[in-house]
Image: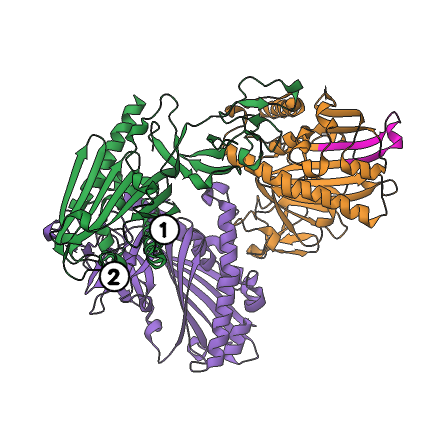
Chain colours: A orange, B green, C purple
Amino acid sequence: MAFLKNAWYAGAWSHEVGRAPLARTILGEPVVMYRTQKGEPAVLSNRCAHRFAPLDRGRLVDDALECPYHGLRYDSRGQCVYNPQDDGVIPKGARVRCYPAVEKYRVLLNETAATERADIAKIPNFDFIDDSGRYAVTTGTLLIRANYELVSDNLLDLTHTQFLHADVFKSEAVMRGRFEVIEDGTTIHSKRWCPDAPPTPPLRLALNYDKHVDFWMDMRWDPPGLMRLDVGATPTGKPRVDGVHNLEMHLLTPETETSTHYFWADARTYGINDPVVEENNRRALEHAFIEQDKPMLEAQQAMLGTAELWSLNPVMLKGDAAALRARRVLARLIGEERL
Amino acid sequence: MAFLKNAWYAGAWSHEVGRAPLARTILGEPVVMYRTQKGEPAVLSNRCAHRFAPLDRGRLVDDALECPYHGLRYDSRGQCVYNPQDDGVIPKGARVRCYPAVEKYRVLLNETAATERADIAKIPNFDFIDDSGRYAVTTGTLLIRANYELVSDNLLDLTHTQFLHADVFKSEAVMRGRFEVIEDGTTIHSKRWCPDAPPTPPLRLALNYDKHVDFWMDMRWDPPGLMRLDVGATPTGKPRVDGVHNLEMHLLTPETETSTHYFWADARTYGINDPVVEENNRRALEHAFIEQDKPMLEAQQAMLGTAELWSLNPVMLKGDAAALRARRVLARLIGEERL
Amino acid sequence: MAFLKNAWYAGAWSHEVGRAPLARTILGEPVVMYRTQKGEPAVLSNRCAHRFAPLDRGRLVDDALECPYHGLRYDSRGQCVYNPQDDGVIPKGARVRCYPAVEKYRVLLNETAATERADIAKIPNFDFIDDSGRYAVTTGTLLIRANYELVSDNLLDLTHTQFLHADVFKSEAVMRGRFEVIEDGTTIHSKRWCPDAPPTPPLRLALNYDKHVDFWMDMRWDPPGLMRLDVGATPTGKPRVDGVHNLEMHLLTPETETSTHYFWADARTYGINDPVVEENNRRALEHAFIEQDKPMLEAQQAMLGTAELWSLNPVMLKGDAAALRARRVLARLIGEERL
C-alpha cells in the first residue's frame, strides 16, 4: 500500500508540542516534534544520521536537538550544527530529514512530500475550532489499529450510527432520510437530510425541543483524510441558524498501513459554558469513538489481515457511495504521484 | 500446509452454543455459531459480506444474525434477509458462507467441504458419551498452540505416559506390553496389552484390587483427528467386562496451522455417582492435559517453528508406528482432495 | 545475516551450569547445558532427535539427559545411550549435536563450528577474572534485544559515555583525548589517552586524588565479540601502575540476529574488600548497562528494523573507526568461512 505523499497530515495537537521532544510514527516514518525557543514547530526524522539513535530521547540545546548517543546536534531544519568529535567538523551529509510544518486549527500539520509543497489552501476550513465566542470545543486523540481508510469509510457512512452507536444516537429517521453524495474536485460531500422527524437523543436534548425537527449530518472529506462534519437540528421548517450544531474536525493520519492517529474536535453551539453539557457531550463522543468505533475498526482490520478491501469483493450498499468515491480519489492521487 | 476439507471437525460443545453468538476460528476461518429459536445450530462465516465486520458482536433478531456495524441480517443458512438501506433490496451476493453442522455426542460438528458432504457415518462411535446409565462423563476443552498432528502423535504413542505423566500414570508394564498397530481403511488402531502386571495407579484405585491385572490402552484414530481411547484393567485372566474402563473421546480441530482446539471427554465405569472419584479423575486428567501435554506440545511446536516434522528427519521408534500411519492416511486424503 | 561459526562464544557463566539442565538459544540454535557427575560441562542441542522435545525439561540419569517426552537418553557427547522401547536397540542416527565446550575465565565457552576446532589460543587474556588477590570482580548478564554488532559498536566508541552515560562518567577530557585505532591481525585496539585532565567522577573517587590525572580507556576487540577494556587513571606524569584500573571482560553472544547475550565482568584494583566500593561500582555499571545502553541499543535495533546498518548510509565520525574495522574483520572472516 502506498500513502499520498504530497499532502498535509496532522502530526500532533499544538499543545502536545513543546520543549520536550515528542516522538510519533507517521506514514511509517519515525518523526520527532519540538518547538524552538521562539515557539516555532520543528518536525524532523527521529533517526540520527550517524547511528540511527532516537533523537527524541536527547535534549534541546537552545534550538538544536542533541542526539542522546554520541552528541551530534541538529537544528530545526534538520542540519547537523555541532559535532563533538572531529575538531567540530560537520560531516558531509550529516542531516536528518525536515518535514515542512504548519500550525492551524490547534494542530501541527506535517507535509511529507519530498518534491513540492502541498497546497495549504486545500486544507478545509475548520475556523470553528478557534471561534471560542460561538463554540465550545472538545478534542481528543485515538490510536486505532486499523488502516486509515477503514476509519474514513466509517465516517463517510453514518448509517453505522444506527447500529454501532444505537445506544446513544438512534433515530429511526436516519435510515429513511435523503442521502446525497457530491464530488467536487477532490472533495467528497456526504449529506444526510432528515426532515420532519424525531432527532437523535443528543440533538433533542441540545435543542430542548420535544416536537419533530429537521436534522442533518453533512460530512466533507478531503484527501488524504481531513474530514469536517456538520450535525444539527432545527425545529421543522425553521432555518438551520435557528437550530443547534455540532461542527466536527476529524483528521486521520496513517501511523502505519494498519494503524491510524485519529485527531478529533467537536464544536457545539449549545451549552457553551455549561460544564454538565460539556461533560455529557464528551462522554457521548468518547463512548462512541473509544468503546464502539475503535473496537469495530480493529476487528475489521483483523478480519482483513493483510488483504486489501477490494480483493475480498465486498458487497456494496448505497450508503457506501461516499466512501467509495473517497477511496477512488485517493487511489487516483496516489497513482498520479507515482508517475 | 493444507487441511482436509471434506471431513467433520468439532466446532464446539453443544452446551456452548446458544442464543449468544459464539466466535471461533476453525481451519483458519472465522466462524460464528448460534442456535435458532427452535434450537437448531447455525454455523456461519463470521465476516459480514459488506465490510467484514465480525457478526458475533451483533444480535439475533429472531433467527437472523444482525451485523453490528451497518445492520445487514443473515439467516441461519447465511443468506442476507434484511437490508436497512436501499429500500430493503437485498444486494446480489449478500450472503456469508454456511457450514453444514451436525450435533452428535454433545458436540457441534462442522463440515468445511464446499463441494460434497462428508460421510457422517465415518464418525466413530462415541455412544458412551450419552450413556449416563453406565458411565460417568467428564469433559474439557483446551486451546493448544501446536499443530493438531502433534497432538494426535501424542495420543497415538502412549509410551509418553511413562515419562511425561510418570507422576500419575507410571507402570513399568507399559513399556514391555504388547503393542499392535492395525490399519483398517482410513482407521488406525494403536493397541497396548499388558497382561499379568501391576497397573497404573489410577487403574489400581479404580479396580480396588492389589494383585496383578491385565490392562490395556486401545486408541483408535480416524481422520482428520477423531480419536477414541479404551483404557482399562481386569484381574489377571478375567474377561474385560469384569474390569474397569475409561472410554475417552478426543477431538482435534485445527484452529490454525499451529494451534488446535482440543475437545476431550472421559467416561468411566467406576465410581459413577461418587463425587470424590469424579474429582480425582478430573484432576488427574486436567493435570496431564493442561500441565503436561499442553506445555510439551507447545514446546515441540516452538522447536519446529515453521518447519514440517519430516523435513527435520526425526528418528523413528516402534511406538511411532501408529502416528506415522495416521499421518500417511491424512496426507493421502488431503492429496486426493486436491486432484 | 550470517554468524561466524568457527569461533568461541560464551554460553553461560560457569556458576550457571550444574546438574539442572540450562536452556539457552545461541546463534539461533536451542542448546542445553549441564554438568556430568565429575563436573565436566556438556553442551548439546536442546532438541531431541525423536520428536524435537526440549531436553532441558528432562532429568539427568547419571550423566545422561533423559528426554521428558518419550525417555530417550543422551550422554554428554550427544549420543543416545538408552531407548526404553525397541528392546533397547538404539536407533541409527539417534544423537543430538554436541558443541565443543571449554571453561575459562568463569565462563562456559561454546564453539559452533562443525568442521574444525576454533583456536582456543585466540581468546584474549582475561586472567584478571581469576586473580582475586589483585582484583575485586563484579559480573553480570544482560539479554539485549539488538544485534550483537550494535553492542560492539557501542563498546568500541566510548565517546558515547559522554552523552548516554553523562550522569556518571562525564569528563570534558574524553572528547579531546588522543584516540588511536590499531589493527593487529584480527584484533582491533581502540585506545583513548587523556593526559593532564580531570578524570571521570568514578576514577576520581577510586584514585582519591583531587588534581589532574592522566587517564585512559583502552578497548580490545577480538572476533566474534570478545572484548577487553582497561580503564584507569594515575596522577599526571606517574606510571600507570601507580594508578587505579578497571579491567573488564565483555563477551557478546548472538542469541538471534536481533538479540544478544551480554556477559560482563569488571575487575578493579581499588577498594577490593570494601563493600561500599563494591556496591557503588556495581550500581554505576548496572545503571549504565541496564538503564542506558540496553534501551539505546534496543531503540537502535527498532529503528533499523530488518535493515542492515550499511544499507542506511550512516554518517561516519572519527570515533567509529574501531567499530568500522571490527565489522570489516568479522565480515571478512564470515565470508572466508563460506568459501
Query: Does label 2 or label 1 sit earlier along the sequence?
Result: 2
Which three-letter amino acid code belongs to the residue tagged 2? Arg
> Is residue C278 among the parts visible in the rendering?
yes
Q: Which sits in the foreground, B337 or C130?
A: B337
Q: Which secondary structure class fits the magenta region best? A: strand
Q: Secondary structure at mark 2?
A: strand
For residue C150, the mark is none
* Residue drawn at point x = 34 percent, y = 68 percent: C126
Q: Quadrant of the C terminus of chain C?
A: top left
Q: Is residue B208 above or below residue A90?
A: below
State which chain disc 1 sits on: C
* Residue drawn at point x = 73 percent, y = 50 percent: A36
Q: Secondary structure at mark 1?
A: helix
Q: Is residue A22 left or right of residue B161?
A: right
Which three-letter amino acid code belongs to the residue tagged 1? Val
Tell me residue C235's x, y (percent). 50, 78
Q: Which sits in the foreground, B272 or A90?
A: B272
